Amino acid sequence: MTVPALWQPRLGACPGPAGTRFRVWAPASRQVELVVETPGTGRHARPLPTGADGLFEARFVDLGPGDLYRFRIDGQGPFPDPASRCQPEGVHGPSMVVDPTAFDWSDRTWTGVPLEDLVVYELHVGTFTPEGTFQAAQRRLPYLRDLGVTAVELMPVADFPGSRNWGYDGAALFAPARCYGQPDALRRLVDEAHRLGLAVLLDVVYNHVGPDGAYLHAFSPFYFTDRHASPWGAGVNLDGDGSTHVRAFFIENALHWVHEYHVDGLRLDATHAIEDDGPRHFLAELAARVKASAPDRQVLVIAEDSRNLATIVTPPDEGGWGLDAVWADDLHHQIRRRLAGDADGYYQDYRGTTADIAATIERGWFFTGQRSAFLDAPRGTDPSGIPPRRCVVCVQNHDQIGNRAFGERLHHQIDLAAYRAVSAMLLVVPETPLLFMGQEWAASAPFLFFTDHQPELGRLVTEGRRREFARFAAFADAATRERIPDPQAEPTFLASRLDWEEPAREPHAGTRRLYAALLALRRRETALRADAATEVVALDESTLAVRRTGAADTLLAVVRLAGGGTVDLGSLTGAAPSAPASRGGSGHGWAVVLHTEEDRFAGDPAPPTLRLDDPPAADFVRPGTILLTTRPVP
């Protein structure tokens, strides 16, 4: 598959049979020069003629893939190309001409994974493996296929300053980070994922650029505006003077990942920080352009957005923006409040009761217009009518772990029995589940915040990181804040790398077996398909039930979140159709599929006792989840 005719690069260095065309947008400049820096030829400048709308361009027959270049703007610079496909010497160095059509793809029949079948596995390339490269991540793809996920989501890979970063400080937005590998290494990863039946989603950041190494301002004063503010400074200019080209730049970036790297979807970072007062919101235009450019395959556009806006995932013909899904964090927050007791910051808005957790699962998100104490304003809109699969839910992700002072994962702060119970709940809800790397084996590694900025900026980042936590009660003392790991220190980064010997050791191996069994169940059971009906009930203050009803059978998850006790199941099991029972008693047609306290999952099992005679009940010794079905179990 080559770059399709429906989309061709507009900016940057585009090599072809007749040489390489260089094009850059510099609307306030009088003169732009191409500075050729290929080793062995010396540095020399070539003028670029000006064209329409502030574009400067020229084609040179003697330049091609592998050549290095920068742009000099009105005598200043030279600066790397804002649309550079590769920065071999780092974000401050020269750009390299890359031919994206030269790669020999093997995925010509690949059409993607539909939203209804999505189970997302989020990973950070630099910490997913000891090597921290695209190639090393590629070698782990068979493991992910066998685990049972259907999509890999890569945290941002756009090149950044230094040798380590979460990726949200991207500076060269079109260039894969050179510390992870060359552009073709990323293509090989995607190609192999497709061969194994895995989709690849990519995190992209369009609400800001990193504080070091991003040179957009050197080419145009129109990229940012003080009319909109963001947590990172001036907002991106999507609705003022010059915004037509700014919008086109970021949309071209999205299209380039879809077509030059064959990614199956984009997760748009913090879209609540993308402000646009124009007649058509930028997100709506981006989603429409991406989908129109790839009509022969499934390409998903997913927002990370804290506002709970139904508009984001409402189809355009119904007045919405037409994105496929949105990260819905309310379920995560309810669970952390309930199981780990978090109450600072935005957690103050959540009670974590089983009734609230049940309501969150049934709706997709919890806040539908109620007042948020954290925001001191109403939050959310009514999600009625939105298919649950359009909400991406989790019990941990990179933000919810890494934004904690010590990068603790959920299972670091609760017992494993409760962790197994809530893991089972996550994988039977009707929403789209997301796992964070290592979650499936209860990894011991934290996921900390790490950077590698130049010393002065790095010092400010470290100070700012520790200052952020001063408003939390646990960090009111300055000495306590000093114990927060330094983002700039290499050990902070290394501590975040997964230990791949753990999945073979207990108790990690048992947790991994549980996740594999649950994912196989999600793939196999008709009652867990997207079109199955869902009922969620709070049975008592520690127990809830998720009942999924498909065309042929029903699956019931009884989830005990805390302590032991007897749970009355009469209201849930009495309506089940009559069928032969297996492993679960007789009289009501229910059979036990699995429970999270089986000895294959728990090193110290404490199984619940299930009674399906009258009255039906479950006696829990400690937290756990029982899964039952109305069909016979082999």
Image (cartoon, rainbow, N blue to C red):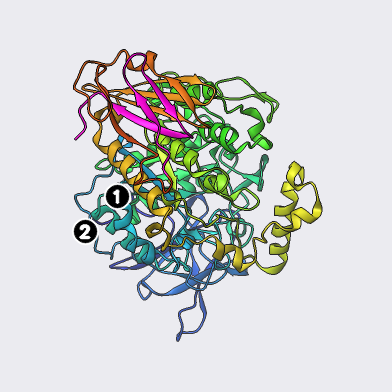
Nearer to the camera, 374 or 602: 602
Q: Is residue 571 above or below residue 490?
A: above
Q: Is residue 46 above or below residue 211?
A: below
Q: Is residue 228 visible?
A: yes
Q: Which residues are magenta?
A: 605-634
Residue located beneath label 2 in the image: 106
Image spot of residue 566 (x, y percent): 46, 23
Q: Is residue 189 above or below residue 608?
A: below
Image spot of residue 33 (x, y percent): 53, 69
User: Quick one: quadrant of the N terminus?
Assistant: bottom left
Mark 1 vs mark 2, CA separation in Å: 14 Å
Q: Residue at x 68, y 30 (%)?
A: 375
Mark carried by residue 198: 1
Nearer to the camera, 99 or 417: 417
The image quadrant of residue 593 is top left
Q: Is residue 626 above or below residue 289?
A: above
Residue type, mark 1 in image:
Leu
